[in-house]
Amino acid sequence: KVLVVCNLKAVKIVGFASNGMVLAAKAEDGSKVELVTPPSNAQVGERVFIDGLTGEPASSAQMKKKKIWDEVAKELKTGEEGVATWQGKVIKTSAGSCAAATIVGAPIS
């Protein structure tokens, strides 16, 4: 299981249509990359959330036009124990926190 941003505008990557982006943490020195994963008992397709934030996700057109992803991505990183965060707030599923296995304090993209 992995975390995928799925409301991005479709683009072609190496000749294939891509409608999403898999999230990964990258060590500051670039020596290691790890996928951000939900807890093993999380439901496939479940929407992630951050406590205190509400509302519906932006459409792919809104994401592109307002450059929402560009702004959100700047604030994604791993915290203690590799837990995925946005603006320091934990990214979760109903089963618990999403995380990279071992990379701490690194950007997520």
Image (cartoon, rainbow, N blue to C red):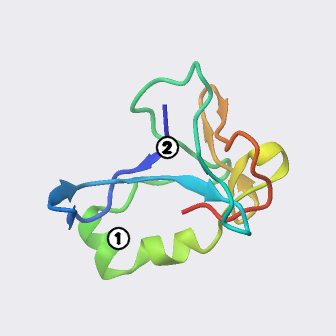
Q: Within the image, what quadrant is residue 9 found in?
A: bottom left
Q: x, y percentage for residue 88?
A: 76, 61
Give, as a three-letter code, the residue at label 1. Answer: Met
Question: Does 12 sit left or right of 89 as displayed?
Answer: left
Residue 16, by quadrant, is bottom left
Q: Residue at x 51, y 53 (%)?
A: 23
* Above or below: residue 16 compared with residue 45: below
Residue at x-position 73% and y-position 68%? 28
Which residue is under mark 1? 63
Q: What is the distance, in whole Å, between disc 1 and disc 2 at their CAs?
A: 18 Å
- Most foreground residue, 30 or 65: 30
Q: Is residue 9 left or right of residue 73?
A: left
> Are circles 1 and 2 on residues that touch, CB within 8 Å?
no
Q: Position of residue 15 (x, y in %)?
A: 14, 61
- Quarter of image, res 75: bottom right
Seen in the picture, residue 46 relative to 87 is either above or below; the reply is above
Q: Secondary structure at mark 1?
A: helix
Pinpoint residue 87: horizontal percent, then vertical percent.
71, 66
Q: What x and y, as percent, mark residue 94?
A: 59, 29
At label 1, counting other C-alpha atoms closer than 10 Å, the crowd grade (few under 14, some 14-19, many 20 or more) is some
Neighbourhood count class around disc 2 (C-alpha, 10 Å): few under 14, some 14–19, many 20 upward? many
Q: Residue furthest bottom?
A: 66
The numbered disc on residue 3 is 2
Tell me which label, 1 or 2, sits earlier in the chain.
2
**Vertical relation: 35 (above or below) 93:** below
Q: Nearer the viewer, residue 55 or 7?
A: 7
Number of marks: 2
Residue appearing at x 17%, y 57% in the figure: 17
